[in-house]
Image (cartoon, helix red, strand yellow):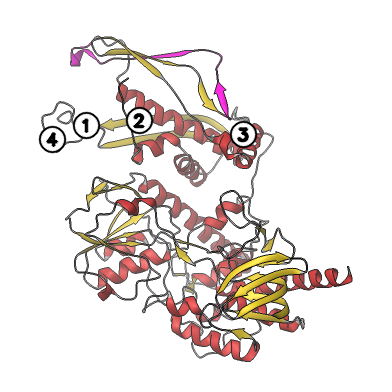
Amino acid sequence: MTQQTSNHVDNGVDLPAILEARTALEATPEAAQFTWRASCEWIEGVHSRSTIEGFYGLGEEQSRSQTFTLDADHPPQFAATDDGATPVEIVLCGLASCLAAGIATVAQNRGIQLHSVKAYVEGDMDLSGILGIDADVRNGFDSIRVSFKIEADASPDEIAALVAQSQKRSAVFDIITNPSAVHVTVE
Amino acid sequence: MKMTDTTIIGAGQSGLSMSHALSQRSIDHLVLDRGEIGNSWRTQRWDSLRMLTPNWANGLAGAPYSGSDPDGYMTASEFVLQLEAYASRNTSQVLRRSAVHKVTHTNGGFLVESESGSISSRTVVIATGATACSSIPGAANYLPSSVFQITPDRYRRPSDLPPGGVLVVGASASGVQLARELRLAGHDVILAAGSHVRLPRRYRGMDIEHWLEVTGTLDQTSHDIFEQNRARKLVSAQLMGGTENVDLNALQSLGISVVGRLADIRDGNALFSGGLANLAASADLKMHRFLDLVDGWIAENDVEMPQPDRPGETSLPIVPTLSLPLDNGPIRTVVWATGFVPDFSFLDLPVFNRRGRLIHDGGVCQLPGLYVLGLPFLRRRRSSQISGAAHDAAELAQHIETHLRTRTAA
C-alpha cells in the first residue's frame, strides 16, 4: 500500500503539515504528550457553562485564538430550562465530529475527494440507571449508533475503509469504547 | 578463546539458513544455541501444533521440501526433525547448550560470552527469533489469584488447564487455535479479539499460501510498504495447519463467544472494548482486498480455477459483552495469547532506540558487523515465514562478506 496524494484532491486538510508533525513527534515523544482542558461553572439548576482555552502540548502551554464556551442544560421534560444541549448529547457530538475529522484526514491521505459527509448519531439510554430505579441498569449509553452518508470520488469499499480507519484512529471512539481511569478530587 | 569471522546466535531456521549461506561463501563461522537445534520449536510449542504453512512452503536454504506430502502441514516436532537433518548436512559447527550471556563491542568486532566460553568474532548474527518471550498486558496484574493463567509457549494440551471456563485473550494464530482446541476439549471459551487478520485457509481451490506466493505478496519488501513499522507489528493471520478455518465465524459456530479487546481488569471484572465490530469490518475489508488481488491475478493469467468462494461477513453478537466477572465467576483460566517479543537483553551494545527496540534496516544493525534475522517484515513480508529465512540469510550473507572484505582491506 503506497501513499497516494493526488494534487487534485482537496478536502481542506493540510496533509503535508500533519505528516511533518507526525515525523517530528515520532522523533521527540515528549512533545507528543498533550493535556486537554476545560473548565466548567455551574450556573443554575442543571445549567452549566464550560470554557475551553489553552492546552498543554509540544512541550509547553499553548493558547488559542479565541475562548470557546459551551452551555449544557436539560430539556423541559427534565423540568429544566433548555439553555443548552445535554452533556450526553455533547458526547455524541464529540464522537461524530472526531470521526468526521478522521474521515477527511484519511481521505486526503488516500487521495479521495470528498463531496459531503453527514453523520447521524444516536445513543440509547435507560433512565432507570441515572434515576436510581434499577441498580442493574448502567447510567450511560447501552448502545450508540453512528450512520454516515458520504459522497466521494471513491468506491463503496474505499468509503467503507475510510470509515473503518477513522474509527481506528479516533480518540473519542477509543474513549467511548474502552474504559479510562477517571480521578475526581475536591480542592 | 575461540576466534571466528561470524558468530550466529540461534540454531533455528534463521541461524541454520545463515550458516548455509556463509558456508557457500566459505566464511568461517560458529552457530550457538542455548539448547538444542530448533530449541523453541521443541520447548515452546503445544502438542497439537502444526505449521501454519503447507509443507511445500517450508523448505530451507538449498533444501526445498522433498517429502511425500507437500500439501500437508507438518507438526512442530516433524519440523524439528527437518531442522536436525538439515543441520547435519549443512552445518558442522553447532555449539549446543551454549546460551549467550553477553555480547560486547571490541576493536576488531565483538566479544561473545557464552556457556561454552568466550568467542572473539568479527561479525555477529542474532537469530534468536521474534518470539523469545510472551508479551502479557499490564491488566494481568489485576487478575484474581484464583484464576489460572498461561501463555501459548507454556501451554501443551487441554489437560494442563483446570476444569471450567477459559478466556483466551488475543485472536491471532495462537489465540484462535487455542480457543478452538480448548472448546473442542469441552471448555466454555470466550475469545477476546482486538485487531486481527482474517484469511480463509483455502480460496478457489488452493491453499491461501499459494495465492500469497503467486501474487507476489510475500515478496513485498519493507521498502514497498509505506507504513513499515505498522507492517512489522502486524499480527499473524487467523490460520491453522490443516483444512479448518479458524476465523471468528468458524469459532463462533463451535460455540465460542467472541468479545472485544481486553481493555482492562478492574475490581475483579474483565472489561472489553466495544469497538470489535469495527475491527472485524476492517479485517473483512482487508481480506477481500487480498482476494480481489487473487481474482485479478487469476483473470490476468487466464488460469482455470474454481469460482470465487468468498467467506461471509464476520457476524458478531448485536449486543456485545463489555464486562465479565473474574472473581469466582465461570472463568477459571486466562490464556494470554497476546503476542511475543524478542529478547535481546544479552546485547550490551548501543543498538536500541529509546523504546528499547533493536534498530535495524533490513537486518543490518547500526553497529557495523552486527546483523539480525527472523523478525517480522525484516526485509520482506516473507521474513516471518520459514521460507523467508533462506532469502534474508542469502542477502545478509552477501552484506557480511562485503563487510569482512572491507575491514580486511582496511
Q: Crowdedness of circle 3 by 10 Å Cα count: few (<14), some, many (20+)? A: few
Q: Is residue B141 left or right of residue B100?
A: left
Which label sits in the foreground, 3 or 2? 3
Give the quarter of the image for residue B117. Answer: bottom right
What's the CA distance linking mark 3 and mark 4?
A: 46 Å
Disc 3 versus disc 4: nearer the observer:
4
User: Mark 1 touching mark 2, by CB under 8 A?
Assistant: no
| Picture layout, residue B74 above or below residue B275 | below
| Residue linked to disc 3 | A18
Q: Is residue B299 visible?
A: yes
How far is the residue under mark 1 from the one under mark 4?
A: 9 Å
Residue at (31, 66) in percent of width and height: B179
The percent position of residue A119, horizontal first and vertical second, equals 41, 30
Question: Disc 3 or 1, which lies upstream in sequence?
Answer: 3
- Can I make out residue B390 in this image? no
Residue linked to disc 4: A135
Which amino acid does the dot numbered 2 rest on? Val
